């Protein structure tokens, strides 16, 4: 493994910021640290960088324990949320700064900076100062500066937070392509789940100082390991009592069981659209929201409002209309366990109405 963290722990006074966190990262992977604000993501990143010292635990880079190494000796590049560019330096000098500190020869510096300027799409801007650049261009300079000393690990603290939504979308794709071309192991902090899902090879969900789950975006979305992950990733409707859902009445084994249901796991429409009619519940359309490519439908079932999507190609629904609602899949949890379940009635051939 390129990066290994074992039992990492950190307090800030009486606040327990990071709690016994362990993980391993393969070389060349782009990892997203995702979670709510104050959950411990940046604290983990800063300990990896050497900007904070852990109270306990081991940090290992390519087989070497680095806990006691200074930041500049760890072979890392760091991209800050606020760019942290030197205002009095040109683009060229900003990128060259780390190489100059390492006393690299002038010819080598020029060669490396020219390479990175081309790689990051900054050709023609070498002589400009940060205030003469757009937010996206400044962020590209920050990336180039971090990559200049050829680090073994790239750390990024909410790298797109300071740019507007349109530029942020463009930079996501650009970063993904850049990391693939350079082949550097990278870890970035974000609280934007769309950003993490789009960019990262793997995601680590951090909440209240703990690592809730690590896996590919697909695995985390389809098979959340904890109730927090299930509620945090994507949209979900919480149903306090799973026994009120058609097909899920027997689940829970006598223990009070809750259900989280994603919109795409709910099907809603007139009765004639369903063959598994006995697996459906009656519902009333409460609200319809046009989303351009689809409808967002709010439907009331047994006093509970569920949210789902409906294709524009299907028959239009109207507020107040009586419909049938089929819950295909739910994430169930109680004090004893949590699990994902397909609606059992969908497997029962006797429930099919022909």
Image (cartoon, rainbow, N blue to C red):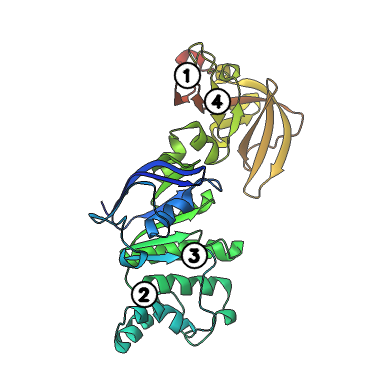
Marks 3 and 1 in Cβ contact (< 8 Å):
no
Whether residue 197 is visible: no
The alpha-carbon separation of the residues under discs 1 and 4 comes to 15 Å
From the top left corner, tell me how far across and down residue 340 is, in percent: 45, 27
Residue at the image point whose x is 50% and y is 41% from the top: 207
Identify the residue position indicated by label 2 in the image.
148
Element under disc 3:
loop
Element under disc 2:
loop
Whichever of callouts 2 and 4 sits on the residue coming sooner in the sequence is 2
- Up the image or down, 43 lies above or below 307; here it is below
Q: Residue furthest left?
A: 63
Identify the residue position indicated by label 3 in the image.
80
- Up the image or down, 35 lies above or below 114; here it is above
Q: Marks 1 and 4: which is nearer the front?
A: 4
Neighbourhood count class around disc 4 (C-alpha, 10 Å): few under 14, some 14–19, many 20 upward: many
Whichever of callouts 2 and 3 sits on the residue coming sooner in the sequence is 3
Q: Along the line of sight, which residue is nearer the eye, 77 or 192?
A: 77
Q: Along the line of sight, which residue is nearer the eye, 61 or 67?
A: 67
Identify the residue position indicated by label 1 in the image.
344
Residue at the image point whose x is 52% and y is 27% from the top: 328
Q: Along the line of sight, which residue is nearer the eye, 192 or 275?
A: 192
From the top left corner, tell me how far across and down residue 232 is, in percent: 54, 40
Identify the residue position indicated by label 4 in the image.
259
Q: Residue furthest top?
A: 254
Marks 1 and 4 in Cβ contact (< 8 Å):
no
Marks 2 and 3 in Cβ contact (< 8 Å):
no
């Amino acid at each position: 493994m390129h990066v290994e963290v074992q039992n990492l722990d950190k307090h800030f006074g009486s606040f327990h910021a990071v709690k016994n966190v362990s993980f391993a990262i393969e070389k060349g992977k782009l990892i997203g640290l995702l979670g709510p604000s104050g959950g411990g993501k940046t604290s983990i990143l800063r300990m990896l960088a050497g900007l904070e010292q852990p109270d306990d635990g081991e940090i290992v880079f390519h087989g070497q324990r680095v806990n006691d190494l200074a930041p500049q000796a760890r072979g890392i590049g760091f991209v800050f949320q606020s760019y942290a560019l030197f205002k009095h330096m040109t683009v060229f000098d900003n990128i060259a700064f780390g190489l100059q500190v390492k006393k690299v020869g002038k010819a080598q510096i020029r060669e490396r900076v020219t390479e990175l300027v081309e790689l990051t799409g900054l050709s023609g801007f070498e002589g400009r100062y940060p205030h003469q650049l757009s937010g996206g261009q400044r962020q590209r300079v920050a990336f180039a500066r971090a990559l200049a000393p050829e680090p073994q690990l790239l750390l990024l603290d909410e790298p797109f937070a300071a740019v507007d939504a349109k530029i942020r979308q463009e930079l996501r794709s650009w970063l993904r392509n850049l990391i693939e071309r350079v082949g550097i192991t990278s870890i970035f902090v974000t609280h934007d789940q769309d950003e993490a899902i789009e960019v990262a090879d793997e995601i680590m969900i951090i909440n209240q100082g703990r690592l809730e789950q690590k896996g590919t975006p697909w695995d985390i979305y389809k098979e959340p390991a904890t109730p927090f992950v299930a509620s945090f990733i994507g949209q979900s409707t919480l149903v306090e009592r799973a026994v009120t859902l058609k097909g899920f009445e027997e689940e829970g084994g006598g223990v009070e069981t809750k259900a989280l249901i994603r919109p795409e796991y709910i099907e809603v429409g007139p009765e004639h659209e369903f063959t598994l009619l006995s697996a459906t519940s009656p519902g009333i359309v409460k609200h319809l929201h046009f989303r351009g490519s689809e409808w967002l439908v709010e439907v009331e079932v047994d006093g509970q409002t569920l949210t789902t999507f409906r294709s524009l190609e299907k028959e239009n629904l109207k507020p107040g209309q009586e419909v049938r609602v089929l819950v295909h899949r739910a994430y169930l949890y109680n004090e004893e366990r949590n699990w994902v379940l397909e609606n059992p009635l969908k497997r029962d051939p006797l429930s099919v109405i022909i």
